[in-house]
Image (cartoon, rainbow, N blue to C red):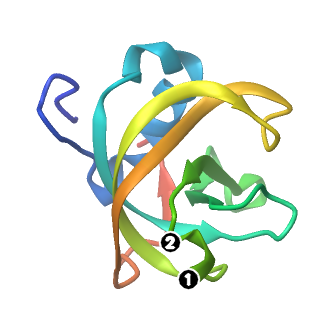
Amino acid sequence: PFDINAAVVEVADSDYALWYRDLMDDPKKYVGKVMRFKGIVAADGKLPKDTFVIGRHIMTCCSDDIQYGGVVCTWSGANTLKTRDWITITATVAFESNRAYRGKGPVLKVTSAEKAEKPEQEVVTFY
């Protein structure tokens, strides 16, 4: 549903769950790719400086299994974000160690972030 070879890979609101699963299954496939998508911020003072998490709530089969599927981001403006802010980011994917993963994982190097309206469907699915 998204063109992984595009100069900027645009992930539509409805495709976040598919992209997130693919990213977590094969993160090295995305290294160096520029991504653009909307998500909800999780900010935590325990994260390293200039770090936050962006993601969406994902429902696999029913409302009882809804979980937040987030990706670690680094950005010099991270301290301006608050948990539950909706933003659209443009970021380059790296695969590196981060305390939030307790090892290596995908890290989005944010180049721009803008406030966004929450989508019509806040919870995404694989359907």
Res. 49 image quadrant: bottom right
Count of numbered tags = 2
Image point 67% across, 79% down: which residue? 83
Percent from the top left, x then y, of residue 125?
Answer: 49, 50
Image point 33% across, 59% down: which residue? 13
Residue 11, disc: none
Percent from the top left, x then y, of residue 33?
Answer: 30, 29
Residue 80, disc: 1
Res. 95 image quadrant: top right
Image point 62% across, 77% down: which residue? 79
Q: Quadrant of the C terminus?
A: top left
Q: Say above or below: 5 vs 6.
A: above
Q: Say above or below: 5 vs 90.
A: above
Q: SS at mark 2?
A: loop
Query: Residue 9 vs residue 43: left or right?
Result: left
Residue 77, disc: 2
